[in-house]
Amino acid sequence: MIKFSKQQLKIPKMMRPVYMVTGGQSKFDRAMPDKRTEELCIDAFTMAAGLLNMSPAELKSYVHTAYYGHFADHFGDQLLGEAVIHDRLGLDPLGNIGVKTGGATGGSTVWEAVKAVASGYSDCSLAMGWERMDEVPTDEGNFLIAAAADKDWESPLGHIYTGYYAVMAQRYWQIFGKAEDSFRETLAEISVKHHGYARMNPFAHSPKKITVDDVLKSPVVAHPLRALDCCLMSVGAACAIICDEKTAIELTKNSANKPVRIWVGAGSHTLRPADRRDMDIPLLPNETADQYKDLGKRFPGGDRYPGFTGFLAARMAVWYGYRMTGVNDPSEDLDLLELHDAFTISDVQTYEDIGVRPYGEGRDYVESGDCYHTNPKTGKPGKLPSNLSGGLIGCMHAVGATGIMQIFEVATHIWNRWGEIHGDEKRWKDFGRKKPADWTDLQVKGAKRGMAISHAGVGSHVTATILMDPDHLLKEDA
Amino acid sequence: MSMFGQVYVKDNKYKLKGDFHHLTPNIPIRNADEGWKLMGVTNPRDMTYIHSYGGEAPFFEALGEGKLLATRCDNPDCEFKGTIYEPFRIHCADCLGKNTIIDITELAKTTSKVHTFMVCERAGAFNILDKPVKFINIEFEGIATILMSYLSVGDPEIGMKVLPIFRTKNPTCTILDLSWVPDGTKKEELPEGFTF
Ligand SMILES: [Zn+2]
């Protein structure tokens, strides 16, 4: 589809306010030979209950429906793995359903839970996601991931998903990055930032103190992408508890968690980038058609939209999401982001899709220092910090859990509990990890609103989850 | 002796011959750090699937005959009538009408250009392409979409003119029967089994 009808552009409307009251996560790592997946899910759920000062059994008594995000049945080698987790969480005979939308599975799972509460079907829903990517060796794992591409037209080509993405990166690199060394360094800076923030996160799979030079010297995966530009392949689980207002107030009465309002917008685009036809750019509230008239002149070859360089699914997710919630300019209206940094370059592409910068100018978000917790150029708080968790590059990519981890991370800032949760000595010790001597509290001071983007592969599905302190809404009837 | 699983269709039913799976024993996984206590077990599995190409079958058959087929929406009521698709779409993405199959071999020989590409040293399990793998995405004049394939000779560049080549000797009947070479490549330089 390259033209939208009025019906298709309806601004999504929820029948009542929906809140996220808590969440939790397991440890994230490359492999966990000592734990079954359900043990990780129980860890995440127990943490969620703990943040409410409740026992898991008490929290379970509120859950009415459950949504489970698990992308790859063939990775876990268990069809209906959702039923196993649901049983082990002791939630039978409640209704539950599995959700899978590739890398966006976590975000989509929360989308479903939010709709269940918004509609009135449930007053409290569990969104739980996980992935088990350590039960096959890496080459076989690459084969299984490539099975998410079109099996007749793409997968036989090398069975390597990174490659299907890398052709998009190459085009962006040459057209919008103009193949400049300075752009290559900006990409490296993203990896340094995300591995660096992961050092402050006890859950994180890949904390690293590295330099731009280390990234630029890491092995080439597919030019211009190098090993340190790529996301992790992780094991772990994450969950969120989604409620109506009455339940949210009740559940948080003995907790430092303030219920946060939650909305999810979703978009999609063809599974094969090959099928993406030229179209007009759907504009965000802070954009005009005029500003893109000379895009092809400023960036020769950049006038085909979305071509291989923009993610229409991300654009549509925020197109709906911003209008639902009254976000006009994300840099002004939001306090922090968690983006789906599958690769450093896709992080930059996403800045444009979500309107943090106009198309063609994504790199400026990094180069200006706006994306940092503390802007390295000014020493002042970054304007719109992103991926303080470490993201997919530094924290984890346990596919079904990833989007939920990112939503949870944003919520911890709005709860003003980031430091407490991530600085907890006991947690570092329980995970067998050493808290660094220079551990820094990355709490975004006074955070009231944030967004997490959950994204599938070459952009087939994207969700934009927007969280707000209910006393700081942008729109009365949101 | 085992025999590869083989399938044909008769009376619109699959007829099977040979072995569709191979038996390999499970092996325990033990912990070297803790007195070799049991941690888990391997689950080997080697299985052959049976897959229908359905309405795309003509496309895959034609590759082995040296032809590149695409489809076009000819529905007079479609807002986007005349749109040509490569990848071959059985139905129009807009009106869902059945598309017309067209031969674009000549068009591909004269107008194909590299839209983008990537060169990758790694590949996943079961890969049969030579490494490094060189993916190219090809734009054609007058076609709405951009086909993904691979380059068999030389190094890719954005904007480079390329020509299709076809595995006409012992075709695999997969997308791998189609490949590309830079314009000007000589017949002798083509990989084994491929022709222009
Ligand atoms: Zn049509």
Image (spheres, coloured by chain):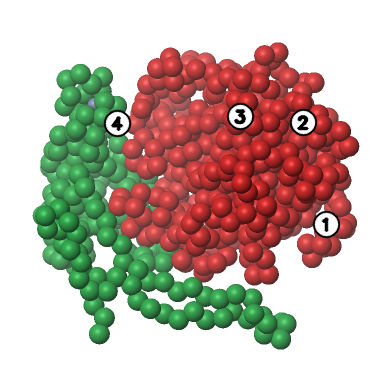
Q: Rounded to the nearest whole Å, what is the CA distance between mark 3 and mark 2?
A: 16 Å
* Label 4–label 1 contact, CB within 8 A: no
Q: Residue at x 67, y 66 (%)?
A: A35
What residue is pinned by disc 4? B93
Ranked by sequence position, the earlier of labels 1 and 3 is 3
Among the chains pictured, the one given red colouring is: A
- The secondary element bearing badge 4 is classed as loop
Among the chains pictured, the one given green colouring is: B
Asked if marks 4 and 3 fall on the same chain, the answer is: no
Which quadrant holds the N terminus of chain B? bottom left
Nearer-the-camera pick, A13 or A16: A16
Q: Would residue B36 be found to the left or right of residue B80 on screen?
A: right
Question: Which residue type does callout 3 highlight?
Answer: Tyr
Q: Would you identify the image quadrant in which residue A211 lies? A: bottom right
Q: Rounded to the nearest whole Å, what is the CA distance between mark 1 and mark 2?
A: 26 Å
- The secondary element bearing badge 2 is classed as helix
Q: Residues within 10 Å of mark 4 (few under 14, many from 20)?
A: some
Q: Residue at x 43, y 51 (%)?
A: A148
What residue is pinned by disc 3? A121
State whether residue A257 is above or below residue B42. Answer: above
Badge number at residue A248: 2
Nearer-the-camera pick, A185 or B8: B8
What residue is pinned by disc 1? A427
Pointer 3 chain: A
Q: Residue at x 24, y 70 (%)?
A: B5
Question: Which residue type does callout 1 highlight?
Answer: Arg
Q: Rounded to the nearest whole Å, what is the CA distance between mark 4 and mark 1?
A: 51 Å
Q: Is mark 4 within 8 Å of ligand 1?
A: yes
